[in-house]
Image (spheres, rainbow, N blue to C red):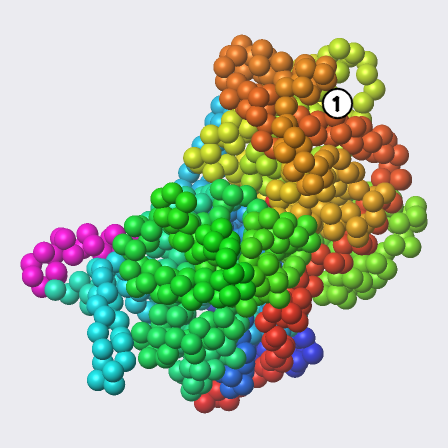
Amino acid sequence: MQSNSVTLMGQVCSEDTRTGVLVETLKRSFLNNLFYVQGKFPGIATQNDYYMALAYMVRDRLLHRWIGTAATYTKQQTRTVAYLSAEFLMGPQLGNNLINLGIYDQVNQAMSELGFNLEDLLEQEEEPGLGNGGLGRLAACYLDSMATLGLASIGYGIRYEFGIFDQDIRDGWQVERTDKWLRYGNPWEVERPEWSVEVKLGGHTEHYVDQTGRGRVNWIPYEVVQGIPFDTPILGYRTNTANTLRLWTAQASESFDFDAFNSGDYLGAVYEKMASENVSKVLYPNDDVSQGKRLRLTQQIFFVSCSLQDMFRIMKAQEIPLHQFADKFAIQLNDTHPAIAVAELMRLLIDEHSMDWDEAWGITQRTLSYTNHTLLPEALERWPIDLFGNLLPRHLEIIYEINHRFLDEVRIKFPDDEDRISRLSLIDESGERYVRMAHLACVGSHAINGVAELHTQLLKQDVLRDFAEMYPHKFSNKTNGVTPRRFIALSNPPLTQLITDKIGDRWLTQLEDLRQLEPYAEDLEFQHQWQSIKRATKASLAAYIYKQNGISVNPDSMFGIQAKRIHEYKRQHLNVLYIITLYNRLKANPDLDITPRTFLFGGKAAPGYFMAKLMIKLINSVGEVVNRDPEVRDRLKVVFLKDYNVKLAQRVYPAADLSEQISTAGKEASGTGNMKFALNGALTIGTLDGANIEIREEVGAENFFLFGLTAQEVYDLRGQGYCPRDYYDSNPELKLALDRINSGFFSHGDTDLFKPLTDSLIYHDPFFLLADYQSYIEAQERVSQLYQDQSAWTRMAILNVARMGKFSSDRSIQDYCDEIWHVDPVKIELSNNLEEFF
Ligand code: PLP
């Protein structure tokens, strides 16, 4: 141990190998972990051993804060936010923890003195891809902000053994590979088997009257699964608060199978055990679609029940009476995936803790709040009654009772309106009967929110209109946000430094401070520095592209990037139509003077979503022709970056000149990629959809490339009978682009390959590409023209960044705190004296 002290975050810490941050201490700690945790010496250690040793070194410095935080919360019986989410798309942990701890530079130096390159070690980390896209990444940003703001919170979810699949591209098609992220161990988590809980599934219920004359229910399950919690510390930025992400792994409950083991059916019992463990095996890889599979509902009840039981355990340990549950916990439901919490919380209170219905219902409603994430009908979860009752017989009874009481309430507020009753019912009885999870969430929560102004407005007008009329006070908007720590401090150090040099570093926790950059927008010297940073990040992405795809792209061309899940409503194929249009113009007029452009795409398609997979193939096929054509060389390049995940996202955002946010108006709930691009100085070409609208309001209409129909115009056009073929027939450039695809030009003469896509566009076009085509082309022309004037472009980019303050997830979380959760920050004092805990 060293006797040195160092001041860290305003605290004096003595230097020991688990908490110290001097370079010498870090080196010693790293080597200790290599020897005594990994059990390796440099002669045989792999790159992964070095990464693990470094990760454990950093983890020690987190644990210190984690324990201090938990001790404070326990002592103060702090009101706690429980964020329930089936997805947490955390991204790599090491770099972010270094940033939040404030020891990036020291660790960099320590590693380099030991002969390592920190960047290489960071690259080694396998990210936990426990989410599909925006929704899961939002949950991760919110955990970062809650810790940074000093709010007591726990993220609850599932520790999927296989996260989102790894994407390969073969012959232009997406190929899925299982994501074995736990293969080499996960240094960030701590298993807590002592806090395991049991979850009942299937079977039947028995109703009886107890000695006091009270009606009771006994649920006799068919199966019991055990949930084991694995905890990951979530450190705030430059604070002592380290909260917890608690993810549940499923295991067979041996006590339940004891009879089978004892009755000689050993193999049968082992088989059952394996089946139980499937519950947390794999993430459903669908974004914005519900699959209605039994295993998915099992996953939902599994993590919800585990989490609620865990909260009951915490109440008990802190000796807080159960009737104070709503004072102790604010539970946020991230979409309907955890909506079964309404019925499960009622069941736990009534059946397992003998509370009466009315009190239990009051607690449930006061505790829960619900965030809706989508307007797409195919994403609204509903479960066939038979499937639901078979898996969750007791929950179905409770839902019927909730529904019965709720519909009576509706009848009083809206007498003689049976249509309204059937629209609002928790049970869809229009054909096969279903449980409607969004309805359950709306009835059981005291607050319901959308994730951008337009989204909330459309929820109230359309998808949840009857609920908005029934409970107007429950509805509010909470526009999404992103964490500037990961998405600029970690991913774009040079830009972070440049900004900090001008306005100090407070902006990383007070993002509105970025406004102070506005005066520099006209400053030529500052513009020049800005441009050289953008140029360098583009060159670095170009090097990555060359390594990955073997395509050489020119860093001086304009990088337009569309990186997000592949989906028809996100309209990557509209972008492709523009590429083909440009290509056609160049073929018709080889001397045409155009702004050289590189079109970059990234994103995964759900494995069962044929159209999305065909869109990936189309992008690659167009790229193959365009990139090889000597006539367009250096003016047009098309690249599909495989396996878009958080790690790649962090590489991509800083290198974008233009951010493509081109969804059909009224379809994208918010978007968060749009915010991350803009925060890194990309200009946006976009529709009036989701948070684009608010981004445009903030940065100024003159600094945003707007195109396309509004949500209202889309609605009206649909109502009038939209005929995409009219656009095809009347717009020669559009016709030529579609005909080129159909002619087999991009598919080695195969005229059938892309027909499902082009037929869908010409004859149905559910997402109004053809209606928006001309307006998009014209907006792209304005983009190209402006890019020729680098000073004007840079000025706009600086203004975009300066005006992005609203989109920090700190602001979103503060809104949730003020208007829904009513929780206050808790100060965490750290002590280096472990004995103080006794
Ligand atoms: N996928 C990843 C890996 C992301 O980091 C993000 C970021 O917001 C998204 C998907 C969502 O992108 P968008 O909001 O553009 O749909």
The residue lying at 34 percent from left, 79 percent from top is 353
The residue lying at 31 percent from left, 50 percent from top is 387
Q: Is residue 52 magenta?
A: no
Q: Nearer the viewer, residue 8 or 43?
A: 8
Across and down, in percent, residue 635 comes to 75, 23
For label 1, being within 8 Å of ligand 1 is answered: no
Question: What is the secondary structure assignment of the residue under circle 1?
Answer: loop
Q: Nearer the viewer, residue 832 or 794?
A: 794
Across and down, in percent, residue 66 comes to 52, 74
**Amino acid residing under circle 1:** Arg
Across and down, in percent, residue 405 comes to 42, 66
Quadrant showing the N terminus: bottom right
Look at the image and tell me whether residue 466 can be seen: yes
Magenta residues (range): 260-282
Q: Does 60 appear above or below 432?
A: below
Quadrant showing the C terminus: bottom left
For residue 261, side relative to residue 104 (left or right): left
- Give the quarter of the image for residue 451: bottom right
- Give the quarter of the image for residue 632: top right
Q: Which residue is mark 1?
A: 635
Dominant SS in magenta: helix
Across and down, in percent, residue 257 comes to 17, 62
Q: Nearer the viewer, residue 23 or 118?
A: 118
For residue 638, side relative to residue 253 (left or right): right
Q: Is residue 281 magenta?
A: yes
